[in-house]
Image: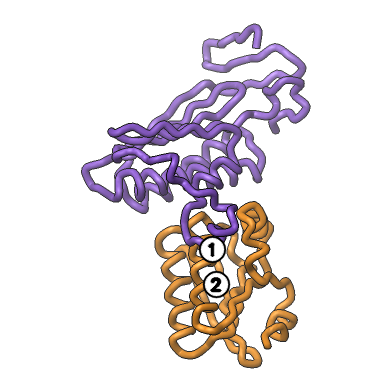
Chain colours: A orange, B purple
Amino acid sequence: VTMKVGTRQVDGVTLVDCSGRITLGEGSVILRDTVRDLLGKGNKKIVLNLADVNYIDSSGIGELVSAFTTTKNQGGELKLLNLTKKVNDLLQITKLYTVFDVKDDEAAAVKSFK
Amino acid sequence: VAAVLTCELGFILIPGKFSIAMTEQRVSYTLDSSLETIDRAEEKATRIATDLGFGEDEVMQISMAVREGAVNAVLHGNAYAQDKKVTLAFEHTASELIITIRDQGSGIDLSKIPNPLAPENLLKTSGRGIFLMRSFMDVVEIRPSKTGTELKLIKHVHGATAGGEEASQ
């Protein structure tokens, strides 16, 4: 398995702990299904904890964008937490760092939702 | 480079401030148009770049660029067609690593590749592969034709460049 996710609830916010690789194929599909499932169940405050994601390819980047826009279009909010240096660098060079709300502290991320 | 001495065992010695010794080698693979090919291409790139002494960051850049090239070949070039193959070749000299990826698709239209950094494209879910390759490699050449696209990725060995301030480890 290239990627694993676990979800937990903290003060009405869903934290999705991701680990592994978000790449074309399984990793992207798991992320997509997880976010769609959460939104379908009415969980619209989502934080993707990427602390243990060490690799993302262009498909994975696209999946993050898709998760962001899908959540936003359904009236929700999706934020990123604890980026590794590699993922941070990728979001910087693709200029997506300015698009995503990126946090480096879980408590602050949870509190940041309205 | 004024003079290159090739030893019997295939080592190349470049006279200059820093001497680089690398085995001149070319390996190529013919691979199916499958997701597995993309992972295999990335793995081979990682191993070869590591063996050649590239630093950790450069290895990651090379492996990512090769992965993106393989994705384009399998998905956009050959469109997963079982009868079409992807050819992946690694060649290295004392001064550079050259990676060639060929597909058997109908060729890519370079004029239709949007700039992924343009504000109107930032939220698109695809179209960043070539941009990432250009970000990570020193040279990216794309040669489309009606019988397929050839992609050439080149990474310089820092120690072999003029002045040689950054000797390869």
Instruction: Tell me which chain the residue with mark 2 is part of.
Output: A
As drawn, the residue found furthest toward the left would be B83
Residue A106 occupies quadrant: bottom right
In the depicted structure, whether residue A112 falls above or below residue A82: below
Tell which residue pokes out farthest to the bottom in this image.
A11
- Quarter of the figure that contains the N terminus of chain A: bottom left
Q: Amino acid at mark 2?
A: Phe
Mark 1: few/some/many CA within 10 Å (<14, 14-19, 20+):
some
Name the residue tied to disc 2. A68
Q: Name the subunit of mark 1.
A: B
Give the alpha-carbon distance from disc 2 to disc 1, as whole Å.
9 Å
B93 is higher (above) or lower (below) than B151 = above
Read off the residue under disc 1.
Answer: B123
The reply to whether the C-beta atoms of the residues labelled 2 and 1 are less than 8 Å apart is yes
User: Which residue type does callout 1 highlight?
Assistant: Leu
Residue B24 in percent (x, y) is at 52, 21
The image shows residue B67 at horizontal and vertical percentages of 47, 47
Mark whose residue sits in front, 2 or 1? 1
Q: Nearer the viewer, residue A9 or A76?
A: A76
Q: How crowded is the residue under tag 2: few (<14 C-alpha within 10 Å), some, or many (20+)?
A: many
Q: Residue at x 73, y 83 (%)?
A: A107
Secondary element type, mark 1 = loop
Q: Secondary structure at mark 2?
A: helix
Residue B106: give its label. Answer: none
